[in-house]
Image (tube, rainbow, N blue to C red):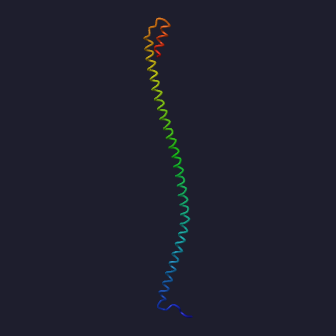
């Protein structure tokens, strides 16, 4: 049988073949590792997507709660303004009543008609 590789290159060819097999083994091992990590990576990506969805849901709930708080705050402010206005009107009515009572106390009517006339003047 004929020898195709010259004797002076046999060691280099065998070394090159061994290196090629080593590289092939490294590539195959890399694929195996990558395949193992791919399943783990998929699981991690699913967990991450679930966490992002949960965060988005919480953000939506927080926004709803903030909107409700803002609405309650506006209602409280409106009620406070209405209370202040009612207090101001009550104070004005009390002052008017005190002024009328003071005028009524100073009335000196001689008869019923005079009393009605003075009261009519008082209401103007």
Q: In the picture, which quadrant includes the N terminus?
A: bottom right
Image: 59 above or below 79: below
How many numbered marks are there?
0
Q: Residue at 55% of width from left, 61% of height from top?
A: 43
Q: Residue at 46% of width from left, 11% of height from top?
A: 118
Residue 78 placement (x, y as % from top left)? 49, 34
Image: 11 above or below 72: below
Between 106 and 45, the one lying in front of the other is 106
Q: Residue at 51% of width from left, 43% of height from top?
A: 67
Image: 58 above or below 38: above
Residue 15 placement (x, y as % from top left)? 48, 84
Q: Residue at 52% of width from left, 72% of height from top?
A: 30
Residue 91 placement (x, y as % from top left)? 45, 23
Q: Residue furthest bottom?
A: 1
Q: Residue furthest top?
A: 110
Image: 101 above or below 67: above
Picture quarter containing residue 108? top left
């Amino acid at each position: 049988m004929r020898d195709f590789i010259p004797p002076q290159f046999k060691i280099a060819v065998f070394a090159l073949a061994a290196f090629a097999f080593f590289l092939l083994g490294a590539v195959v091992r890399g694929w195996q590792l990558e395949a193992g990590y791919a399943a783990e990576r998929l699981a991690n990506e699913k967990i991450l997507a679930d966490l992002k969805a949960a965060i988005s849901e919480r953000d939506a709930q927080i926004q709803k709660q903030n909107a409700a708080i803002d609405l309650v705050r506006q209602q409280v402010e409106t009620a406070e303004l209405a209370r202040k206005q009612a207090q101001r009107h009550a104070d004005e009515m009390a002052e008017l009543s005190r002024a009328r009572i003071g005028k009524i106390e100073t009335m000196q009517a001689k008869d019923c008609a005079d009393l009605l006339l003075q009261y009519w003047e008082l209401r103007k």
